[in-house]
Image: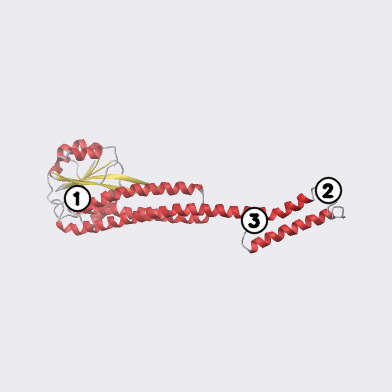
């Protein structure tokens, strides 16, 4: 657990946690904790049992916003896209008048990247900290969306150039991740919409327009992933069409080759019969003439098919 007093964006480490129970003369306290630290933080700050239970739960947390006496409890999901797989990590936030507590089970990149933002913006209140943190989390979804779009474009190009069976597995896997992520975006958008309300005592009114901007970005993200979901359906149709076209191409080649060999098979069948009287059967060099006829006939049919673009 790390305790810092933040004043005009400047961080000052705090060793005695009991000193954070009183509001500082200037600034606020930021307590960056993990779930094991809740045993200490809950009795000190009066954190609600249900909120603590949500933090400790092993199940995936749905984004939420809950109002308790003396503090708000907010859950949003940070997103990561590593090794072509999407990960969501719950970021639990307790917002008070003179403090903000962030509780996580894994490392959250936004908690590290928010520090220079706080210093640059000279943040002096916990609700300002909350705004910048949520803004970074939402922006990270745009970055993941760009990577997903790049992956979709690459898949589409690969399918059009050379279709493989592995493409279908990749399409199904990516579509499942997009659908799963889309289910999370709705509740998270609603949480941000709640932060935009004007009746929240722990959030200053002038921040409402800033939270409105984050909400608009959240709506854009939701619409973007709706588009990705539709694109994955189109990719699957393109995969099926490409397979059908490839099968038709193979059948066309086989049909043309079979057609070319049909007259040759006829000639060899006729001259392979056990009759004494066959035209040219006893002619000197007749076998070479027959082979030449078959070669000319086969080559002629091949070039005819090429000219008509049947091969």
Placement of the N terminus among the 4 image quadrants: top left
Residue at image location 76% in from the left, 49% down from the top: 269
Point out residue 136 in the picture as x, y percentages from the top left corner: 28, 53
Q: Quadrant of residue 280?
A: bottom right
Point out residue 229 in the picture as x, y percentages from the top left corner: 37, 53
Q: Earlier in the sequence, mark 2 or mark 3?
A: 3
Q: Earlier in the sequence, mark 1 or mark 3?
A: 1
Q: Where residue 256 is drawn, which disc sits there?
A: 3
Residue at image location 59% in from the left, 52% down from the top: 251
Q: Which residue is mark 2?
A: 275
Q: Mark 1, mark 3: which one is toward the viewer?
A: 3
* Label 1: element kind: strand
Q: Earlier in the sequence, mark 1 or mark 2?
A: 1
Q: Mark 2, mark 3: which one is toward the viewer?
A: 2
Residue at image location 55% in from the left, 53% down from the top: 246
* Label 2: element kind: loop
Residue 215 vertical placement versus 90 (above, below): below
Q: Which residue is mark 1?
A: 6
Check disc 1: other Cα within 10 Å, few if <14, some if 14-19, many if 20+.
Answer: many
Q: Is residue 245 visible?
A: yes
Placement of the C terminus among the 4 image quadrants: bottom right
């Amino acid at each position: 657990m790390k305790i810092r007093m933040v004043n005009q964006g400047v961080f000052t480490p705090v060793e005695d946690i009991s000193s954070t129970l009183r509001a500082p003369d200037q600034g606020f306290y930021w307590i960056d904790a993990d779930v094991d630290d809740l045993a200490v933080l809950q009795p000190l700050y009066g954190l609600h049992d249900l909120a603590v239970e949500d933090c400790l739960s092993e199940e995936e947390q749905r984004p939420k916003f809950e109002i308790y006496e003396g503090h708000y409890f907010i859950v949003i999901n940070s997103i990561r896209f590593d090794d072509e797989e999407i990960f969501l990590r719950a970021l639990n936030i307790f917002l008070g008048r003179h403090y903000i507590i962030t509780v996580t089970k894994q490392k959250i990149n936004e908690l590290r990247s928010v520090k220079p933002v706080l210093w640059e913006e000279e943040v002096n209140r916990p609700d300002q900290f909350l705004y910048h943190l949520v803004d970074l989390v939402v922006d990270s979804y745009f970055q993941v969306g760009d990577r997903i779009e790049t992956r979709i474009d690459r898949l589409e190009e690969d399918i059009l150039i050379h279709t493989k069976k592995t493409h279908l597995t990749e399409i199904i896997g990516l579509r499942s991740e997009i659908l799963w992520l889309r289910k999370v975006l709705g509740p998270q958008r609603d949480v941000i919409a709640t932060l935009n309300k004007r009746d929240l005592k722990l959030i200053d009114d002038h921040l409402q327009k800033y939270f409105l901007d984050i909400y608009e970005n959240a709506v854009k993200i939701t619409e973007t992933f709706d588009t990705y979901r539709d694109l994955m359906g189109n990719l699957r149709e393109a995969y099926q069409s490409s397979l059908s076209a490839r099968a038709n191409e193979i059948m066309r080649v086989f049909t043309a080759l079979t057609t070319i060999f049909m007259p040759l098979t006829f000639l060899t069948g006729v001259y392979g019969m056990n009759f004494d009287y066959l035209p040219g059967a006893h002619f000197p060099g007749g076998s070479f003439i027959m082979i030449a006829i078959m070669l000319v006939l086969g080559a002629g049919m091949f070039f005819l098919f090429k000219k008509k673009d049947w091969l």
